[in-house]
Amino acid sequence: MAAHRTDDPEGMTIDRKIPLWGVLSFAAFIVGQGLLLWNGQNLQAAELRHQSEQLHELTVQVKAMAAQLNTKDAIDVKQDLRIDELERRVLTVEQIKGLRQ
């Protein structure tokens, strides 16, 4: 490609060359953007792995708590039944005392 066109006005030439500094600056900009994108994605992947590990740990903790609550609920049911039985016995004893007097 010629630096000047044949249809340029007389006595005036228009330089249509792309300066090397412009090409190198543009290339450096593209490489810089690529590096920033690559670094950002690596950081995002590391954070995603970290959050995944935390989620797994929390899931294990929730399952353990659910098992503890189930055990506690079973104990509570037994204790409620025992309290009901004791209340029934007390009422029976009070009724017997009331009949004797």
Image (cartoon, helix red, strand yellow):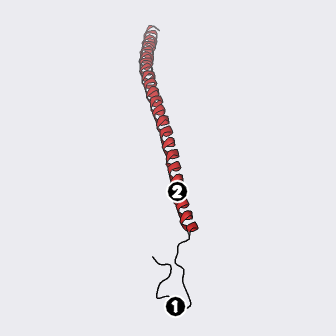
Question: Which picture quadrant has residue 26?
Answer: bottom right
Q: Nearer the viewer, residue 94 or 19?
A: 19
Callout 2 amino acid: Val
Whole-percent x, y for residue 27 in the image: 52, 61
Callout 1 amino acid: Pro
**Tag count:** 2
Q: Nearer the viewer, residue 23 or 74?
A: 23
Element at badge 2?
A: helix
Q: Earlier in the sequence, mark 2 or mark 1?
A: 1
Q: Label 2, on which residue? A: 31
Q: Which residues are magenta?
A: 3-9
Whole-percent x, y for residue 86 in the image: 45, 14
Whether tag 2 and tag 1 are in contact, CB under 8 A, the answer is no
Spatial separation of the CA atoms under disc 2 and disc 1: 40 Å
Whole-percent x, y for residue 45 in the image: 48, 44
Which numbered disc covers residue 9? Answer: 1
Whole-percent x, y for residue 57 in the image: 48, 31
